[in-house]
Image (cartoon, rainbow, N blue to C red):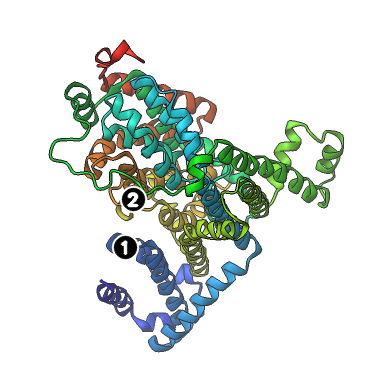
């Protein structure tokens, strides 16, 4: 495989005349290189399709860009390879040395450590078990599974591995097919983690947003932009609504309806002939936690993370404003310190990379103190657990560094400028968010990762949107939202996605059966997101109109396409 990759990348370079690079060395790369400026993202995308390895693909995409820059400077192929590698290393070092980037990586790792502590203390499982006891019928079981998925908002992996195994026995009792359980779990995991104001996703998303705006010379508050994109995450929002409505109405269509009919009428929770890869997940709690686990082991640390995040956003933003030169805002801070406008301005001005890291660190300390006080572990053991939790997100930090570096090399080459000149003349502006959404879905579906897709597309989407409609900042925001939600749609539907695999394993469903039953639902919601979301939004329809209309369209689709699969009368007491 590596040999094929090397041959592919080598061919791309050999097919490019070296004399062209030498002759155009002193010219603007964006104007002179033309299509060649698209080489780095294309290499990353093509190799992601071939290898399914986003980290390697991003690395080679950056390397292709640094080699091009060297060759535009007059270097021969040997010197370009050497200089390109050194430039690549420098790009990564520069990305890591940036205080904002360093803060983002630290907070991502720290939240990973916190999740590790909570899991080992048995807090997440205790919350899940407490909710599972409330399930009395097929409707309430699915709704509680959905609610539990919302509560485990901080990480999609944790969501899939916690919710599925806990709700599986209850779901089986209510004759809910394993495919349906896997769908409910999967359809709440990434969609809620992607839009949660505090999660393992936040640092990655705001890091990409900040870098994309910086590439066009815009100094913005990335966390504020992240919050602004939430109303434009149509797929995330509508999918969460879709799961709730189908759970309440018991309406299904397509292959999912077949699975539900089989489970409730024949009692077959898994399709005949299908095999389940993993019926049981390894129990990750500490032995002592199984006896002493309480919901407070999860609620207090997570609550502390949220509370201290909000307090930090306010205090950090307030300090920044008071030390600035905007006298109007300074006076507002003094006259109305707790007004809605003050909160909005302080949250917008705050440095999220610092605040989230501080909040996650405080929450981790609280979790450690709780665990030691309950004699679940000693301080040394707690630190080991915390570090192990961080390890699960090291790959996220690595991908983030590569994505930042790819953005940097694309900025040097003028890739976004070339795309603006190319698409600005051929594509109607109102189609851009839709095209971004679809392109993101295709890449993430083929690669099985939303993170890598976001890293590839964000540096292109925001500069392009800002150039096509410079007078409309909302256009860039909705385009950023299209990147983030398109990547999640493709990842959600992909059979090679980590979250899809974990959801099927956690629910005890055959993986391919899960994918086949989930795909029609994902595509249906995506079509509603495009037709009633991105196209009207890009045409200027207010978001306050789009959201309720798209929600109504989603509900109408369920009632038009879906048929009720209600055999609850066969359950004891006709429980609901």
Give the quarter of the figure containing the C terminus.
top left
**Residue 21, above or below 104:** below
Q: Foreground: 416 or 564? A: 564
User: In the rendered structure, are the residues bearing label 1 and label 2 in contact, judged by CB atoms less than 8 Å apart?
Assistant: no
Q: Name the residue under label 2.
A: 497
* Side of 404 where 16 appears, left or right: left
Residue hosting label 1 = 46
Q: Is residue 557 above or below residue 570?
A: below
Tell which of 499 and 404 is nearer to you: 499
Residue sitting at x 56%, y 73%: 93
- Judging depth in this view, the residue of 376 and 321 nearest the camera is 376
- Residue 552 x, y percent position in the rendering: 41, 21
The quarter of the displayed image where residue 431 is located: top left
Asked whether residue 472 is in view, the answer is: no
Q: What element carries label 1?
A: helix
Does residue 157 appear in this view? yes
The answer to whether 564 is drawn above or below residue 34 in the figure is above
Picture coordinates of residue 486, whole percent (x, y) = 40, 45
Mark closer to the observer (1, 2): 2
In terms of sequence position, does the residue under pointer 1 or pointer 2 come before the other?
A: 1
Question: Residue at 34% across / 42% down in the picture?
Answer: 506
Q: Quarter of the image holding residue 160?
A: top left
Task: Answer few, some or many: residues within 10 Å of disc 2's Cα (few below 14, many 20 plus, some between 14 and 19).
Answer: many
Q: Foreground: 509 or 232? A: 509
Q: Which residue is drawn at 60% across and 48% down?
A: 375
Q: Is residue 95 left or right of residue 327?
A: left
Q: How far apart are marks 1 and 2 (CA)?
A: 18 Å
Residue 35: x percent and y percent? 38, 66
Q: What element carries label 2?
A: loop
Residue 253 lies left or right of residue 323; in this view the side is: left
């Amino acid at each position: 495989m590596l040999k094929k990759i090397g041959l592919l990348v080598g061919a791309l370079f050999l097919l490019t005349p070296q004399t062209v690079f030498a002759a155009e060395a002193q010219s603007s790369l964006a104007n002179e290189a033309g299509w060649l400026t698209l080489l780095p993202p294309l290499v990353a995308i093509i190799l992601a399709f071939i290898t399914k390895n986003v980290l390697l693909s991003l690395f080679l995409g950056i390397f292709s860009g640094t080699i091009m820059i060297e060759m535009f400077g007059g270097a021969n192929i040997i010197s370009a390879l050497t200089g390109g590698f050194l430039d690549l290393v420098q790009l990564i070092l520069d990305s890591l040395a940036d205080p904002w980037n360093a803060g983002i990586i630290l907070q991502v790792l720290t939240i990973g450590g916190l999740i590790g502590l909570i899991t080992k203390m048995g807090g997440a499982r205790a919350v899940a078990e407490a909710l599972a006891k409330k399930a009395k019928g097929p409707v309430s079981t699915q709704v509680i599974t959905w609610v539990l998925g919302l509560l485990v908002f901080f990480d999609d992996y944790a969501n899939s591995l916690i919710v599925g195994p806990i709700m599986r026995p209850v779901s089986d009792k209510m004759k809910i097919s394993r495919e349906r359980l896997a769908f409910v779990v999967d359809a709440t995991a990434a969609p809620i983690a992607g839009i949660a104001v505090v999660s393992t996703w936040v640092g990655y998303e705001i890091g990409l947003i900040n870098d994309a705006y910086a590439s066009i010379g815009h100094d913005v508050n990335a966390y504020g932009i992240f919050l602004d994109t939430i109303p434009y995450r149509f797929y995330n929002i509508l999918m969460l609504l879709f799961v709730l409505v189908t759970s309440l109405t018991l309406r299904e269509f397509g292959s999912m309806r077949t699975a539900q009919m089989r489970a409730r009428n024949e009692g077959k929770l898994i399709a005949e002939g299908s095999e389940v890869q993993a019926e049981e997940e390894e129990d990750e709690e500490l032995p002592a936690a199984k006896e002493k686990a309480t919901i407070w082991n999860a609620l207090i640390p997570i609550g502390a993370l949220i509370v201290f995040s909000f307090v930090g956003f306010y205090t950090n933003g307030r300090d920044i404003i008071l030390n600035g030169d905007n006298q109007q805002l300074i006076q507002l801070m003094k006259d109305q310190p707790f007004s809605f406008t003050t909160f909005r301005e302080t949250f917008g001005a705050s440095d999220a990379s610092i605040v989230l890291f501080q909040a996650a660190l405080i929450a981790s300390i609280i979790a450690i103190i709780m665990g030691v006080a309950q004699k679940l572990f000693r301080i040394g053991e707690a630190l080991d657990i915390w570090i192990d939790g961080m390890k699960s997100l090291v790959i996220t930090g690595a991908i983030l560094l590569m994505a930042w570096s790819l953005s940097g090399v694309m900025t040097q080459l003028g890739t976004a400028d070339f795309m603006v000149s190319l698409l600005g003349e051929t594509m109607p502006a109102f189609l851009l968010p839709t095209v971004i959404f679809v392109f993101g879905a295709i890449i993430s579906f083929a690669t099985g990762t939303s993170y890598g897709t976001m890293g590839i597309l964000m540096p292109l989407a925001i500069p392009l949107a800002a150039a096509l409609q410079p007078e409309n900042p909302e256009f860039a925001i909705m385009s950023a939202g299209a990147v983030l939600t398109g990547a999640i749609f493709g990842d959600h539907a992909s059979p090679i996605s980590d979250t899809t695999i974990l959801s099927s394993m956690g629910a005890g469903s055959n993986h391919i059966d899960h994918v086949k039953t989930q795909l029609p639902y994902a595509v249906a919601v995506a079509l509603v997101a495009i037709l009633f979301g991105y196209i009207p939004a890009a045409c200027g329809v207010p978001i306050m109109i789009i959201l309720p209309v798209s929600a109504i369209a989603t509900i109408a689709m369920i009632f038009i396409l879906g048929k009720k699969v209600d055999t609850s009368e066969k359950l004891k007491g006709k429980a609901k």
